[in-house]
Image (cartoon, helix red, strand yellow):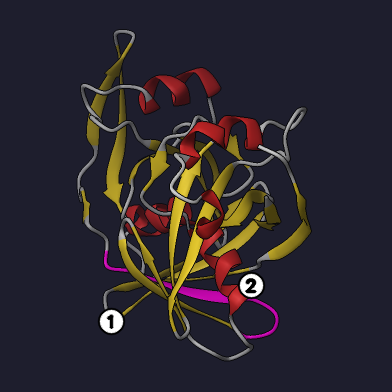
Amino acid sequence: MRFFKMNGLGNDYIFIDEKQFSGEAPELNIPFLCDRHKGVGSDGVVLFREIGKNTLSMKIFNIDGTEAEMCGNALRCLIRHVGAIGKGITVHTKAGVKTGLFNGITVSINLGKPVSYDTELRNIVINGKIYCGKRVNVGNPHFVIEKPYDEELARSISECTAFFPSRTNVEFVTKTYDGYNARVYERGCGETLACGTGAAAVLIASGKAETNVHLAGGTLVCKIEKEDIIQIGSAEYNFEGEINV
């Protein structure tokens, strides 16, 4: 099976044309493909298919084989791969239709309006302790909490199905002079170097019209234009190849 691998700020994905699966259940092979010792190694797998001129569909799978609604980094990578410089691309995702454009250096994407978000802090009880954060859904769920990263807490919040029935991604943020530092725990993956939708959630939780979100793998510029979330960042190739599954 042919594939190519790309990353957005170090958040890496294996991209495979969906037609290669020929009716098989692709999620069964996801953990193997993502394994960094036995497979290709990645934070997830994206299946894509051309459905029209400059129009594609994409399905995003986490390391554990569960399907995610959206991924900003994977979206930027796919748009760079298929789009000519300056040519708008439309991508159908589980979270709706998204658009983007590669300008030759960076990729800008329109994530649309947030599905929902809390303007007030919400309490969540983990192991008898109360933690405050903001719930934001930008096509997939996030919980933004203003405190230093804590791996054990991140996992516990992410897996708290009483509060998040479909689990959640968790952003730990601290303020900087020009925006926010953020470390992200992604459901089904663990901590990743970057998360595009997580950065978008940080923007919404901040209440600002524009901010820089500094992630472990680099910076994403996030802003609101006509109520839509616009995000600008890099997308880079790793390699391509063929693997038997």
Q: Is residue 10 left or right of residue 118?
A: right
**Nearer the observer, disc 1 or disc 2?**
2
Identify the residue at image location x=77%, y=57%: 240
Residue 197 among magenta residues: no
- Residue 166 has which mark? none
Image coords of residue 114 (percent x, y): 27, 61
Q: Is residue 8 above or below residue 126?
A: below
Q: Quadrant of the C terminus?
A: top right
Q: Which of the two residues, 56 or 193, is positioned nearer the viewer here? A: 56
Instruction: Characterize the local packing of mark 2: few (<14), some (14-19) or many (20 or more) Cα atoms within 10 angstroms.
Output: some
Q: Amino acid at mark 2?
A: His
Label 2 secondary element? helix
Q: Which mark sits nearer the N-terminus, 1 or 2?
A: 2
Q: Quadrant of residue 37?
A: top right
Image coords of residue 78 (percent x, y): 57, 67
Report the Cα–Cα distance between label 1 and label 2: 27 Å
Residue 13 seen in this snapshot: yes
Q: Amino acid at mark 1?
A: Lys
Residue 148 seen in this snapshot: no
Image coords of residue 62 (percent x, y): 50, 38
Q: Which of the two residues, 57 or 236, is positioned nearer the viewer here? A: 57
Q: Which residues are magenta?
A: 103-113
Q: Which residue is mark 2?
A: 81
Label 1 secondary element? loop
Q: Which of the two residues, 81 or 231, is positioned nearer the viewer here? A: 81
- Residue 226 has which mark? 1
